[in-house]
Image (cartoon, grey):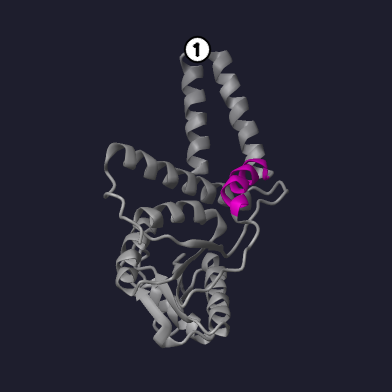
């Protein structure tokens, strides 16, 4: 997305030069160059990420009820080539989410409460297995009892995560619901789950930041990830205004 934006700016600047609007063309060339430098050096991605993540920088220990649900949102799977049946593993950006969910489950159990881990994620990458099933195996290795796992294996995006998980939880009448995802992904996730009728308490996993150096690839990636969240959030509110989203569900 970031490269596309920069490319479009260059195309427009070139078109302006072609139509003899040279001063405006030079200004846009210069603006594009300085925007690239600001992204590459980490200024732009840090601004974008801080606004997304700052509300979740500090962590508050959750108060456990009698019946608790920990919702773990999928973040992709990785296919390992040259292994038996091309083994599938947790994607790099999702390891922190899995670890956080397992940590919360352990804390819940130590408090003597009932605790279910709801793993939400289908197979959007068409790897042949759902994210929920892959993550579930890792959670069992980290101490989560199989009987306490609820797998939601149909969703292909965050909106569907919320809709399908809400349907799964509704008949179970949980006292406390925690939502585990990356800090940058939390704003949009909470909005979607609230729309689906799930009042969840946010518990962030990873918290990322841009790096202050001139090699641009990492900071371009961080900018892309942040822009994806802003676009997704804006899309949600536009769809609400246009009436394209399903009606918001009532929260229990």
Q: Is residue 47 a member of the stretch shown in magenta?
A: yes
Instruction: Please name whichever residue, 140 or 10, is drawn nearer the observer in this view of the structure.
Output: 140
* Residue in view at x 48 percent, y 49 percent: 229
Residue 217, percent across and down? Answer: 61, 51
Crowd class of label 1 (few under 14; some 14 to 19; many from 20; radius 10 Å): few
* Residue in view at x 46 percent, y 69 percent: 176
Magenta segment, principal secondary structure?
helix
Please give the residue where the numbered disc 1 appears in the rendered image.
Answer: 20
Task: Please indicate whether residue 179 sits to the left or right of residue 174 in the image.
Answer: right
Residue 226, percent across and down? Answer: 54, 48
Q: Is residue 46 a member of the stretch shown in magenta?
A: yes
> Bounds of the magenta span?
42-55
Instruction: Please name whichever residue, 17 or 42, is drawn nearer the observer in this view of the structure.
Output: 42
Q: Is residue 87 visible?
A: no
Location of residue 122 (image quadrant): bottom left
As drawn, 127 above or below 148? above
Residue 126, percent across and down? Answer: 34, 67
Location of residue 123 (image quadrant): bottom left
Location of residue 162 (image quadrant): bottom left
As drawn, 193 above or below 129? above
Instruction: Please name whichever residue, 115 or 135, is drawn nearer the observer in this view of the structure.
Output: 115
* Residue in view at x 51 percent, y 45 percent: 227
Residue 155, percent across and down? Answer: 33, 64
Task: Please indicate whether residue 42 sits to the left or right of residue 52 in the image.
Answer: right
Instruction: Please name whichever residue, 174 or 23, is drawn nearer the observer in this view of the structure.
Output: 174
* Residue in view at x 39 percent, y 69 percent: 120
As drawn, 122 above or below 5? below
| Quadrant for the C terminus in the image | bottom left
């Amino acid at each position: 997305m970031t490269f596309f934006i920069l490319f479009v700016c260059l195309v427009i600047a070139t078109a302006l030069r072609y139509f003899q609007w040279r001063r405006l063309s030079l200004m846009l060339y210069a603006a594009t160059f300085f925007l690239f430098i600001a992204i590459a050096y980490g200024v732009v991605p840090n601004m974008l990420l801080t606004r997304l993540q700052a509300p979740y920088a500090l962590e508050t220990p959750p108060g456990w009820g009698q019946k608790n649900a920990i919702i773990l949102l999928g973040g992709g799977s990785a296919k390992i080539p040259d292994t038996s049946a091309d083994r599938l593993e947790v994607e790099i950006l999702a390891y922190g989410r899995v670890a956080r969910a397992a940590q919360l489950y352990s804390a819940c159990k130590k408090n003597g409460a009932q605790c279910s881990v709801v793993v939400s994620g289908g197979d959007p990458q068409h790897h042949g297995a759902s994210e929920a099933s892959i993550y579930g195996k890792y959670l069992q290795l980290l101490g989560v009892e199989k009987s306490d796992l609820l797998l939601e294996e149909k969703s292909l995006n965050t909106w569907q995560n919320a809709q399908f998980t809400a349907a799964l939880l509704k008949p179970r009448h949980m006292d406390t619901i925690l939502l585990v995802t990356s800090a940058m992904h939390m704003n949009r996730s909470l909005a979607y789950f609230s729309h689906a009728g799930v009042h969840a308490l946010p518990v962030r996993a990873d918290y990322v930041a841009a790096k202050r150096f001139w090699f641009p690839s990492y900071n371009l990636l961080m900018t892309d990830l942040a822009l994806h969240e802003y676009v997704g959030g804006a899309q949600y509110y536009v769809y609400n205004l246009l009436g394209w989203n399903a009606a918001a569900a009532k929260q229990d």
